[in-house]
Image (cartoon, rainbow, N blue to C red):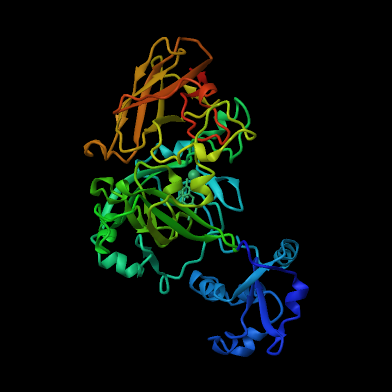
Amino acid sequence: IKGLPEYTLDEVADHASKEDGIWVTYQRGVYDITKFVEEHPGGSEKILMAAGGSLEPFWSMYSVHQQPSILAILEQFRIGNLSEADAKEVAKDVSDPYLNDPKRHPILHPSSLKPYNAEPPPSILVDSYVTPNDLFYVRNHLPVPKVEVSTYKLKVYDANMKETSFSLEDIKTKFPKVTVTATVMCAGNRRGEMVKVKPVKGLSWGHAAIGNATWSGARLHEVLRSLGIDETSPNIEHVQFEGLDTDGVSVFYGASIPIEKALNPAGDVILAYEMNGEPIPRDHGYPLRVIVPGIVGARNVKWLGKIIVSKNESESHWQQNDYKGFSPSTDWDTVDFKTAPAIQELPVISAICDPSNSETISVKNGKITVRGYAWSGGGSKIVRVDVTGDQGKTWQVAKLIDEEADARPYRHWGWTLWTAEIPVSSGSKQVELWAKAVDSNYNTQPETFENIWNLRGVLSNAYHRIKVNLKY
Ligand code: MTE
Ligand code: MO
């Protein structure tokens, strides 16, 4: 927390008795718990073992402590911050904040382990319309919080900051359960291709930082309306979401969406507690996450702790200084994040998932079979996918596989899988394939990355191009 004094471990160690006060540290926080000691549910002797030092070794032993409700109690006693150097020393000795992260399926390819970020092999995406939970890409910015459902509370604040809290049971029982099929995609999906133009800052994603699932939960607009928040409420323009994942100092993951999307019954925003019919897995936001169909992954906040209806957008780093697009000529010396709007609806995209780049595949009757996905933001439908095997001289129109094909206009939240038969000239050993999708706005993908390059490598939706080897 900025503005609080900094202390060293030595200074903290000088406060280990009732006379001198009882101080402890946890991650970057310094706490004066003198008044709390008598109230400690586990007994005062137990908590006194940590006096003048770090709580981490005790909390990793008695792991019931590692939950947001207890962190919140501790936070009330915060008097300062532990110096960065000392915090690093403590961290070395004890707790790795990622220790409590869940186990992951070995098929996922991580691009970063702490925080965990990983995508499945693209070919599995086209094997089923909904992506199995264990194979769904994971994009975490912080450690996965350990949430106890028995004490879990979702706090909702109206524009006057009046708080109402809901247990998970409240969300499940006070509002009808609805199910929405929606694709979630990271703004950085396919960044790995844009990087070839010029380096960017960001994880190098392939083309599987996207997945499609059925999400079940309560409609956000019904939860808000139950608190008297509606179109007539003054001074509301955004709905902010805050996750329970934290860096241990002051940062929680956060994002916001426009109030128009949140209150629109046809916007289908839901507070989801199930993913593909199962409780949402820990990596994907257990026990509750917001699903904002048609909107960039970053606003689909996981481990939802707070909802704040407000005049302003979320102040979070990820809303203000990240997940924005810029001109190809804007670089890190000239960029001013205030000048660009936060990404909400994503542009139309597609990718070839099978075969994969440089794979060797069989030609049958002069043709090869190519499969992939296509999707567009804002509820737009995919109306066509074109694939070429001869650099655009001729295009084949793909057959669309869309289990949500009869979704109403502007509510087309799920992706479209597709398959195309591409003729190849007899005897050729290699073919280059390009794919592009067209959405119901008749928007299509740019040909190349050159003119959409941006310093964060987001919105990377140029034609997908791969080369494959042929056998007969
Ligand atoms: N919510 C929280 N609380 N913390 C996060 O790090 N990452 C966001 C979003 N919601 C994130 C979050 C980003 S950038 C993306 S792309 C999606 O979650 C990824 O969702 P998934 O991991 O379920 O695929
Ligand atoms: Mo993301």
Query: Nearest the camera: 435 or 89?
Result: 89
Residue 418: percent from left, percent from top: 35, 30
Q: Position of residue 39 (x, y in %)?
A: 54, 88
Quadrant of the image occupied by residue 152: bottom left
Question: Residue 448, how many percent across, how many down?
Answer: 50, 21
The image shows residue 61, relative to residue 144, as above or below, that is below
Residue 114 against residue 401 in the figure, above or below: below
Going 34% across and 57% down the picture, which residue do you hit?
A: 271
Residue 42 in sight from this viewpoint:
yes
Please tell me in which quadrant of the rendered image residue 218 appears: bottom left
Tell me residue 89's x, y (percent): 75, 65
Left or right: 319 in relation to 91: left
Point out the residue furthest to the right here: 10
Q: Is residue 188 visible?
A: no
Front residue of 66/311: it is 311
Quadrant of residue 12 in the image?
bottom right
Q: Residue at x 38, y 55 (%)?
A: 310
Q: Residue at x 40, y 36 (%)?
A: 346
Judged left or right of residue 22, residue 261 is left
Q: Which residue: 47% across, 25% down?
A: 462
Numbered-mark total:
0
Q: In this rendering, would 144 be left or right of 79?
A: left
Residue farthest to the front, as pictured: 234
Pick the quarter of the image with the N terminus: bottom right
